[in-house]
Amino acid sequence: MKTDIKSRLTWGIGKFSFVLLLIIIVMPSVLFFYWMVLISLREQLMNIVYPPPLLPIKPVLDSYAKVFAKSPFLHYTLNSFIVAGGSTIISLIVGLPAAYSIARYKQNKLATVVLVSRMIPGLSLLLPWFIFFRTLNLTDTHLALVLAHMIVTLPLVIWVMISFFEGVPRDLEDAALIDGCSLYGTFYRVVLPLVKPGTVVVSILSFILSWNIFIFAVVLSGSRTRILPVAVYNIMNYEEIIWGELAAAAIVVTLPALILTCFIAKHLIAGLSLGAIKG
C-alpha cells in the first residue's frame, strides 16, 4: 500500500514538473505573440505611451486596413505560397530518394555532408546565388527563390527522413523484389507508404522554414515576386516606425503557418513521436 502511494506521488510530482517546465518553455513565445496582437489592435498613440496598457482598451482594426491599403499583401501572400510550396515539393522529390539511399546503403560520409550543408549559414551563399541568377537573368523570378530556398529545406528533408527509412524492415523490400517489383516500384509502393508520418513532418517543417526565410528574398526578389517577410521589412522606414502597422503585418505573415500547423498538429505529433521511437 505504501509503495503504491509512493509511486503515485512520484508520478504526480513528475507530471507536475513536466507541465511546469513546458509552461516555462512555451510562455515566452505565447507572451510575445499576445503582445504583437495587442500592438496591432491599439492606436499608434497608445503604442508609445509608458507604461503600455496590458489590454486593448478600445480595439481597432485600422492598422490592418492600412497595411492592405498601402501594400498588395494578397499578392505577396500568393508569392509566399508559391515559393514555400514549390521549394517543399521539389525538396521532397529530390530528398526522399536521397535519404532512402543514404539509409539503405549506409552512406555515412554523404550523411555528414548533408549535415554540414544544413549547418552552413544561408548568408554565405547569398552572393554566389545572386551572381549565378543574375548571369542567367533569373533575378526577380519565382524559380530563383524556389531554388535558393531549397538550399535550406533540402538538407532538412534528407536528414530527418534518414531515421524514418532506417526504421523500415528490410524484409518487406526483399519480399517485394522477390514478387517481381522493381527497385523503384519497391520504393514508391512499399517504402514510401510506411514513412508517410515522416513525410508529413518534413513537409510541414520545410514549408514553415521556407515561409519565414528572409535573407534570400530581400536580394533576389523584386516588386513582382516579393514575399511576406520582405513586405514586412519594407513597412519600416528611417523617419518613423509605425508599430501598429508593423505588428499587423507580422500577424498576417504568421497566421497562415500557424493555421496550417494547428490543422495538422496531430499528424505532426504522431510523426515526430514515431521518428523518436525509430531513432
Image (tube, grey):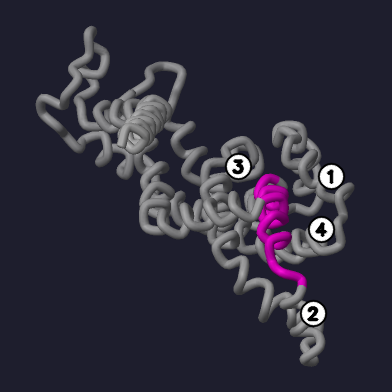
Callout 1, which amino acid?
Answer: Val
Label 2 SS:
helix
Q: Position of residue 100 (x, y in %)?
A: 76, 64
Residue where numbered disc 3 is placed: 217
N-terminal label among 3 and 1 = 1
Instruction: State how far apart marks 3 and 1 are (Cα).
Output: 26 Å
Q: Specify few, some or many for label 3: CA neighbours under 10 Å numbering under 14, 14-19, or 20 or more.
A: many
Report crowding for label 1: few under 14, some 14 to 19, many 20 or more residues within 10 A (C-alpha).
few
- Per the model, the C-alpha gap separating discs 4 and 3 is 31 Å
Please tell me whether residue 11 is drawn above or below residue 239 in the rendered image.
below
Residue 167, image quadrant? bottom right
Determine whether 44 is above or below 84 in the image: above
Q: Quadrant of residue 29?
A: top left
Residue assigned mark 2: 174
The amino acid type of the residue labelled 4 equals Ile
| Circle nearer the viewer, 2 or 1 | 2
Give the side of residue 122 with respect to residue 249, left or right.
right
Check whether the beta carbons of the residues at disc 2 and disc 1 lie within 8 A of each other. no
Report, in whole angstroms, how far the alpha carbon at label 4 lies from the one at label 1: 11 Å
Q: Nearer the viewer, mark 4 or mark 3?
A: 4
* 3D distance between C-alphas at marks 3 and 2: 45 Å
Residue 164 x, y percent position in the rendering: 66, 59
Q: Residue at x 29, y 30 (%)?
A: 34
Label 4 or label 1, whichever lies nearer to me, is: 4
Q: Secondary structure at mark 4?
A: helix
Furthest residue in direction front, as rendered: 1
Are the residues flagged by discs 3 and 2 in contact, CB closer than 8 Å?
Answer: no
Mark 1 residue element = helix
Which residue does the numbered mark 1 point to in the structure image? Answer: 113
What range of the chain is rendered magenta? 152-170
